Image (tube, rainbow, N blue to C red):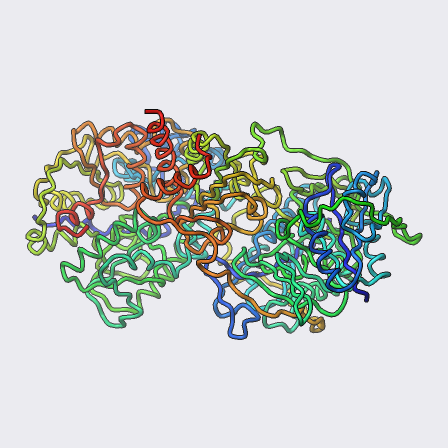
């Protein structure tokens, strides 16, 4: 095992995902501390456009081919796995994402590397590398000491600063060759399914009124719509509301939905499970309303109110109208 | 005035769920008069109103009825059952059985209802709140609220708080006031706290006879550990369950709705009603306490005892009162029903209340304050009509707010 | 289609949980266990596949003391067979240990598909499905919301991506699938039937060699600091509304 840090890059629809830069920034920091190299594994097709964005890496191992154009877990894990077994880096960083989590289990099982999931913090201490994961719906943190062998760590998007990883440059590029004995892919990409075009793009709305289970039923959505209208913002929701069919997929905030960074995010009746927080915790100001004083959302919010969303929503709307009437007079 | 305690109607579980194959035997005395359909507040929205549903069952066309919207639009107001000349158990016999049959066949259930049933199974309450939170409401009541498992001694009164009054903020506020009233009256009472599980009839009205039986068994076991003279509660569904169904399953208790309990203590209560309220009040007879259990006078006696309170009657009232739409399991089917019914029952009833000229709509069932307050907003009477549980009016007059 | 579904019991968050005295694990006496939510969806999706193309659904669970009801519920929903795996464990192991046990069982059995929930709330070391697939060198795809088996056995799946997007992938069985959500909400079992079946249903007990992997080195478990985080606003509804609008106005966000 050497002291190198490997980052598995992620891209979607022609863009490198922000998680890649988060991992690069943290990876550089850890590599520097260990005196190792920062290596990026990049699989896809027509990768030249990405290379200059990966200036933070010492080496980019690139597999450029039609078969890698879209993520499929079988050949991705075969190729990445064989490379990792060959090189035995200290640490492999992946996103705790749809693609990353497929790879995590497969690589860990196939290559017999230990792995850690849902990582939100990674620090080098005297005793070694310590990863902190957030589990049990966000209610418990687990600190784990990375064993002294190649370890895979999946990081929750939004945990590290992407700016630290956005370095333009000319990293050394080497071809990541497909081993001749690599088995044929058992998973084939057929097509991308996009959600039906929504009326509102919540990723560009400056203010969002988020609703969760606490909204209780579809009829109460109008309370949220009224507040959103008074603010000049839009209504979005956590997964349970979308699963019920009360709002379309395009309004979902979270791991499987949109990532939003509005100036203001008001969370009503949202408990704050990590999957949702991932989608909005970087909002500039978060005000959370929940009847449960122990709801995890309160650790992510800037301000909190223990109250019933159904009471506070109309009260806030009224207050805005009062305030604007005062201004007008 | 003596209380008319309704005779305990023996509601054997077997009768609650006549097997559909034996429907002919159980319903053969139906004369197809149509009083049920005529009385049913939901019959217009039903694909097969009650009279037609019975006819189809007798003709062996159960399938069509089971797959229709009919089983899920019944709000368990019991008007049909109360008026049926052949004394057929329609709302509390046929409809639960239809619902049970739908579940048995495996047809998909309304998700709100399914979730409520699953949560009741896991946590003993349909909101899915942890049992440890049963006493949260009492922490800010300002008076002691003893828990049986902690006081470990016989008490005079076991107050079964029930689910809405324990977990719903509107219900919790009322529970705190009742605690203060009981304390002021020096009633020796205690609650079950985290051992309490749903007692009410909502599960079997929803068709989940197995779940209801499970709750009954569990509750009988819990209650068997303690000594108390009587049970007092605010929830008419729990009242009906404990009085009419639990005895047939092996447990008989002295059970009183809080209106009867407080009316019995009028001599003690009256001097404590100090503040004059100066309100015109109209009282809504809830279906379960009223039509099903025939308790009409005690709530009115209490209201008339409040200084400055003038009681006026809605039309219709007592046995003919219009349901709030809350029903036994209907609270979980609100979304389903609202999609199919234009004029909400609660809105209709609020208009009837407003027509009396009253400023206060008084209720004595935990489902009602929220429903009617929604109704007040929807009908534009906000600021003109307020909804209060009788407990809140008493507490205000007793200066316990 | 021969389908295996792996079910796992997890702590029920509704009842809260406490960390034990060692600080390295959840105190089992403080928790009540329920079926992991996405495993329930995995079972539902398996039953849907069986409804469409026929076959057999067998459910498996590690015997850690609380799984019988989940097994019987699965049978009541339409599963053909239930297997309780006794690996000499008295508490829920990490996913590597569990995956090793299941991999040893599935190595000899010929299942076309192995379904399990994509994630459980106590996952710390990767998803169970991915690990089983890794140990058995089977393909694995996770975060699935739909499975459609074509004539000939090719399995079309929809895998969720952010932004409400999904990828349609074709998987060649045998394969392991990590289910996020079934196409329909999991079906209901009337309690009468469940209670009856708890008395009459038979669940196969399968004894296997105890697992040998070392769990990952937990240093400590801790809860987020209460109070750390949001500044809490208090007061009447009106007072709170004024404070909130004040905060928004301070940032020049009010129109």
Quick one: A305 or C18, which is closer to the camera?
A: A305
Q: Position of residue A88 (x, y in %)?
A: 82, 63
Q: Position of residue A202 (x, y in %)?
A: 56, 34
Q: Position of residue B359 (x, y in %)?
A: 18, 33
Q: Residue at x 26, y 45 (%)?
A: B365
On the question of residue B36 being in view, the answer is no
Of all residues, the one furthest to the right in this rendering is A180
| Residue B307 appears left or right of A139 | left
Q: Is residue A301 above or below residue B215?
A: above
Q: Residue at x 71, y 39 (%)?
A: C167
| Residue B357 appears left or right of B328 | left
| Residue C89 appears left or right of B97 | right
Place residue C111 in its image quadrant.
Answer: bottom right
Q: Residue at x 61, y 56 (%)?
A: A120
Q: Residue at x 48, y 67 (%)?
A: C30
Q: Position of residue B278 (x, y in %)?
A: 10, 38
| Residue B267 appears left or right of A146 | left
Quick one: A44 or B176, which is closer to the camera?
A: A44
Quick one: B311 or B168, which is closer to the camera?
A: B168
Quick one: C110 or B100, which is closer to the camera?
A: C110
Place residue B328 in its image quadrant.
Answer: top left
On the question of residue C201 being in view, the answer is yes
Label tally = 0
Of all residues, the one furthest to the top in this rendering is A329
């Amino acid at each position: 095992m050497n002291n190198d840090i490997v980052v598995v890059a992620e891209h979607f629809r022609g863009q490198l995902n922000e998680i890649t830069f988060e991992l690069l920034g943290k990876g550089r920091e850890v590599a520097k501390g260990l005196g190792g190299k920062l290596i990026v594994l990049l699989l896809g097709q027509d990768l030249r456009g990405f290379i200059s964005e990966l200036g933070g890496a010492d080496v980019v191992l690139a597999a450029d081919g039609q078969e890698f154009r879209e993520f499929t877990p079988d050949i991705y894990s075969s190729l990445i796995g064989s490379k990792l077994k060959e090189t035995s880096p200290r640490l492999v960083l992946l996103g705790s994402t749809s693609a990353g989590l497929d790879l995590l289990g497969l690589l860990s099982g196939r290559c017999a590397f230990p792995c850690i999931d849902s990582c939100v913090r990674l620090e080098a201490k005297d005793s070694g590398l310590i990863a902190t994961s957030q589990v049990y719906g966000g209610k418990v943190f687990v600190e784990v000491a990375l064993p002294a062998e190649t370890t895979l760590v999946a990081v929750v998007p939004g945990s590290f600063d992407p700016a630290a990883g956005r370095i333009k440059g000319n990293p050394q590029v080497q071809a990541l060759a497909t081993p001749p004995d690599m088995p044929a892919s058992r998973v084939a990409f057929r097509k991308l399914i996009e959600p039906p075009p929504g009326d509102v793009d919540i990723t560009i709305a400056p203010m969002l009124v988020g609703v969760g289970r606490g909204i209780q039923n579809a009829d109460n959505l109008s309370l949220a719509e009224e507040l959103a209208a008074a603010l000049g913002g839009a209504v979005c929701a956590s997964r349970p509301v979308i699963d019920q069919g009360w709002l379309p997929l395009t309004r979902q905030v979270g791991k499987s939905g949109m990532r939003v960074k509005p100036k203001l995010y008001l969370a009503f009746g949202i408990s704050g499970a990590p999957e949702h927080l991932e989608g909005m915790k970087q909002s500039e100001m978060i005000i959370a309303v929940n009847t449960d004083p122990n709801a995890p959302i309160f650790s992510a919010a800037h301000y909190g109110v223990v109250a019933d969303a159904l009471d506070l929503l109309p009260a806030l709307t009224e207050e805005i109208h009062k305030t604007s009437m005062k201004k007008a007079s | 005035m003596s209380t008319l305690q309704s005779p305990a109607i023996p509601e054997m579980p077997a009768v609650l769920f006549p097997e559909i194959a034996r429907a002919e035997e159980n319903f053969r005395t139906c004369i197809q008069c149509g009083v049920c359909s005529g009385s049913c507040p939901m019959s217009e929205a039903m694909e097969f109103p009650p009279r037609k549903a019975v006819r189809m069952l007798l003709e062996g066309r159960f399938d069509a009825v089971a797959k229709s919207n009919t089983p899920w639009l019944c709000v368990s107001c019991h008007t049909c059952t109360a008026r049926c000349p052949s004394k057929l158990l329609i709302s509390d016999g046929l409809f639960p059985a239809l619902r049970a049959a739908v579940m048995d066949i495996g047809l998909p259930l309304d998700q709100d209802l399914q979730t409520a049933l699953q949560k009741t199974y896991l946590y003993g309450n349909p909101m899915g709140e942890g049992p440890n939170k049963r006493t949260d409401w009492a922490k800010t009541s300002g008076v002691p609220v003893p828990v049986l498992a902690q006081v470990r001694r016989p008490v005079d009164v076991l107050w079964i708080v029930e689910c809405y009054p324990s977990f719903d903020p509107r219900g919790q506020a009322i529970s705190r006031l009742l605690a203060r009233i009981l304390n002021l009256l020096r009633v020796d009472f205690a609650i079950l706290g985290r051992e309490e599980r749903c007692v009410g009839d909502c599960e079997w009205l929803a068709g989940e006879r197995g779940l209801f039986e499970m709750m009954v068994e569990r509750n009988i076991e819990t209650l068997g550990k303690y000594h108390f003279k009587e049970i007092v509660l605010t929830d008419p569904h729990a009242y009906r369950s404990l009085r009419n169904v639990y005895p047939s399953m092996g447990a008989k208790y002295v059970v009183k709705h809080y209106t009867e309990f407080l009316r019995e203590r009028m001599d003690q209560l009256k001097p404590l009603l100090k503040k004059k309220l100066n309100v015109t009040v109209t009282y809504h007879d809830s279906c379960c306490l009223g039509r099903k259990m025939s308790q009409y006078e005690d709530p009115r006696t209490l209201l008339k005892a409040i200084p400055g309170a003038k009681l006026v009657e809605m039309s219709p009232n007592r046995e003919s009162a219009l349901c709030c739409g809350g029903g036994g399991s209907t609270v979980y089917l609100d979304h389903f029903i609202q999609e199919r019914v234009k004029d909400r029952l609660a809105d209709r009833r609020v208009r009837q209340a407003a027509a009396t000229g009253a400023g206060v709509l008084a209720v004595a069932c935990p489902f009602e304050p929220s429903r009617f307050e929604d109704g007040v907003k929807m009908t534009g009477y906000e600021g003109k009509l307020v909804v209060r549980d009788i407990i809140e009016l008493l507490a205000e007059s007793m200066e316990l707010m | 289609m021969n389908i295996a579904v792996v079910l796992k019991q997890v702590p029920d968050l509704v009842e809260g949980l406490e960390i034990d005295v060692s600080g390295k694990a959840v105190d089992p006496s403080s928790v009540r266990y329920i079926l992991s939510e996405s495993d329930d969806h995995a079972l539902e999706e398996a039953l849907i596949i069986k409804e469409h193309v026929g076959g057999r659904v067998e459910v498996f669970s590690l015997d850690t003391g609380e799984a019988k009801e989940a097994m019987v519920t699965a049978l009541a929903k339409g599963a053909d067979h239930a297997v309780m795996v006794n690996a000499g464990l008295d508490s829920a192991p990490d996913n590597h240990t569990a995956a090793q046990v299941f991999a040893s069982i599935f190595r000899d059995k010929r299942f076309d598909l192995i379904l399990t929930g994509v994630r459980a709330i106590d996952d710390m070391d990767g998803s169970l499905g991915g690990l089983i697939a890794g140990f058995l060198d089977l393909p694995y795809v996770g975060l699935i919301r739909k499975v459609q088996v074509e004539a000939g056995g090719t399995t079309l799946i929809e895998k969720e991506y952010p932004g409400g997007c999904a990828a349609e992938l074709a998987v060649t069985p045998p394969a392991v699938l990590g289910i996020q959500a079934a196409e329909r909400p999991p079906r209901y079992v009337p309690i009468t039937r469940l209670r009856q079946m708890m008395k009459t249903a038979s669940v196969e007990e399968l004894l296997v060699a105890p697992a040998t992997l070392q769990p990952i080195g937990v240093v400590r478990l801790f809860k987020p600091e209460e109070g750390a985080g949001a500044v809490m606003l208090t007061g009447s509804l009106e007072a709170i509304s004024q404070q909130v609008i004040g905060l928004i106005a301070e940032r020049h966000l009010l129109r």
